Amino acid sequence: MEVDGEFHQHPDRLARDAVRDDWLNRQGYRVMRFSTGDIDDAFDGCIEEIMGILGLKR
């Protein structure tokens, strides 16, 4: 999981993140991105999404 701030919205950063995410996916990792706003506004929803991906949803 990665929490992205405003910095990650710049085109050059988005491109670098995409390359890194692709590499991580090929290594068997799943990348989940949440913005700092998501964490601030809907923390419980973010946790629910993570738990769902892990198969731990209540």
Image (cartoon, rainbow, N blue to C red):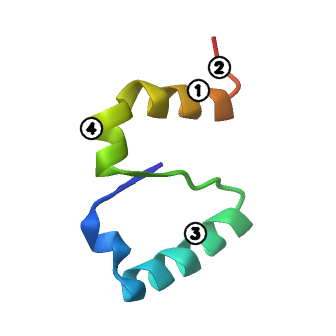
Graded by Cα atoms within 10 Å as few (under 14), some (14 to 19) or many (20 or more), the crowding at tag 1 reads few
Q: Dot 4: few (<14), some (14–19), or many (≥20) neighbours within 10 Å?
A: few
- Vertically, is 16 above or below 21? below
Question: Label 1 is placed on what type of residue?
Answer: Met
- Distance between the alpha carbons at the discs numbered 1 and 4: 18 Å
Nearest-to-viewer mark from 1 and 4: 4
Residue 20 in picture, x, y percent from top left: 54, 75
Q: How many marks?
A: 4
Indicate the amino acid at tag 2. Leu
Say which residue label 2 marks: 56
Cβ–Cβ under 8 Å for marks 3 and 4: no
Q: Earlier in the sequence, mark 1 or mark 4?
A: 4
Front residue of 29 and 56: 56
Instruction: Name the element at disc 1.
Output: helix
What residue sits right under mark 3 in the picture?
21
Task: Give the distance between the C-alpha atoms of the residues marked 1 and 3, in whole angstroms.
Answer: 20 Å
Residue at the image point whose x is 61% and y is 66% from the top: 24
Q: Are marks 2 and 4 in contact (CB under 8 Å)?
A: no
Q: Which residue is mark 4?
A: 40
Residue 19 sits in which quadrant? bottom right
